[in-house]
Image (cartoon, coloured by chain):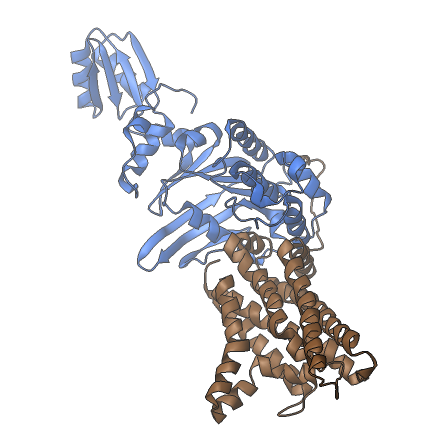
Chain colours: A brown, B blue
Amino acid sequence: MATTDQARPAAPQHSGGGLPGAIAAEWTKLWGLRSTWLCLGIAVLATGGTALLAALALQAGDSTDGMTANALATTAIVLSQFAVVAAASLIVTGEYATGAMRTTLTTVPNRIRMLVAKAAVLAVAVFATGCAAGAAAIAATAAVYGDAMTFEAAHVVHGIVGVGGYMLGISLFTMGLGLLMRSTAGAITTVVGVLMAIPMVSQMVGSETLTDVVNYMPANAGMPLMAGTTDPYGWGTGALLMAGWAALTLAVGYAAMAKRDA
Amino acid sequence: MSTRSEDAVIRLRNLTKRYGDKVVVDRLSVDLSPGRVTGFLGPNGAGKSTTMRMVLGLDRPTAGEALVDGRPYAELRHPMRRVGALLDAKAVHPGRTARNHLTAMARSNGLPLRRVGEVLETVGLSGVADQRAGKFSLGMGQRLGIAGALLGDPEILMFDEPVNGLDPDGVRWIRGLMRSLAAEGRTVFVSSHLMSEMQETADHLVVIGKGRLIADAPVSEVIEASSLTAVRVRTPQPEELEQQLLVAGMRVERHGGDELIVTGGTLDRVGGVAHQAGVRLNELSPRAASLEQAYMELTASSVEFGAPSGAEQAAGTDDRERV
């Protein structure tokens, strides 16, 4: 080791580290993995691509009436959202699977700090990705419809910020499940169930009670954000519901982590 | 060396870890002092790794505590500046480059990023810094883990089985590294299931078996305490001397016509008995047990997975002075 006793200050006072250090470390780690670029890149491309296909299909069917900027947003993210879910799971389960979590917890032993750092980094990355994905969907729709598309500020905001917000919500929801399950496959499968399978089953069953419950689950809570719907609730309630679901799984995930050995 | 630290110690107090009704670490109480290499020895499954994981706050003790500078590890603000740890080479994401892995670690503790290049240089990985860790051999992974441990220039270093997977050059290198870290006044805590490894590097030994403390003493004491440490005597009157030594409570073994191997007594006592009995001695010399023998003896009752092999036991019958 290069340093000698003489070179060492008698009472070193160190700054740095803490939460900002933990966030910087997580940011470095997130973008140091190919899987992040891949997942988030696919999310944007798949959202734009799905919107393009949907727009072409609709136009071929001559349904050109009332095409708004965000009309295809909820369709466009049906598949692409799972690329974001994968990235969100991997930020936690990827570390458990490879043993890297031991390094993470040795360098940032404060569990809360580590989780806040991971959540913050994921939130920023996914929100930006979601906004880009929403913009790609709008661009694809505009490319097909041209002047036939109604272009209003509110639609654009829902189509971009709404999609970003929805993806942010489901990514934190997924991260919480990842903490709880410590398994990439487990976490992703559960989220697929929550976002797709449960709403589909509910539609097939047609039970009113079940429909009511599903209305308040993450998939439906995203509708008013992205599509700007107001029934049964508006985007504010939708955002609160998304936040609530994310907070729930993160809290359960943290509790599990605090109780278990790393 | 004065700035470095009577306080840089790890304290284990009744540290206990149970999984169900299986006790992995059993009321372990040990203090680790700076300026020396403390070898942490025990058969596989003795609880060494679990103990180290509890020190780092990765595993939660069932009872007792493990303190670093008098505090739980998790309360250290810049843990990497106090403790550097190599737990296993697999604590690295295989998709990350060595440089990315170390850069993230450095940022988490507010360490200057130039340290990344420095430690890569120290462990000899500069040439592969931008390769993914998944492509590394076990030995390279081990070196990357050591680089991470050194990153914060810490006073306390913990290495769990560091020579695993290293080639002979790597083994020599890590022995030298541990010696020099201790010589700088740091606390070095290194686990191994191989006694021969510790014989080369450790000053002090903590031996555990089935999670229990078996010995906590300087290497030389562990060897002296061994019943295999003996005094060799050659005399023209072996019968007489044997008689007197037995009376004095020592154990005697006859070898050939004139040689006695005496255990349970020191050189001085054997010499004294001979003098009083008026027995002439042609030789009076110490016969140190090897650390390997002392270790086998210590852990004989607590080997969990199978018996030690005969070859290992036979390997340790040399008369080493340096231990």
Q: Quadrant of residue A124?
A: bottom right
Where residue A106 appears, x then y in whole percent? 56, 53
Q: Is residue A89 above or below residue A213?
A: above
Q: Nearer the viewer, residue B116 or B37?
A: B116
The residue nearer to you, when weighing A106 against B203, is A106
Q: Is residue A186 visible?
A: yes
The quadrant where residue B241 appears: top left
Horizontal relation, residue B21 to residue B193: left or right = left
Who's the residue at 29% across and 16% down the image? B232
In the rendering, at what x and y percent does residue A81 appear?
Answer: 62, 71
Residue A250 position within the rendered picture, expressed as x and y whole percent measured from the top left: 56, 71
Q: Residue at x 53, y 60 (%)?
A: A93
Q: Quadrant of the C terminus of chain B?
A: top left
Q: Is residue A153 above or below residue B270?
A: below
Give the camera-side residue of A16 and B133: B133
Q: How far across and how far down the image is residue A78, in percent?
A: 61, 75
Q: Is residue A258 visible?
A: no
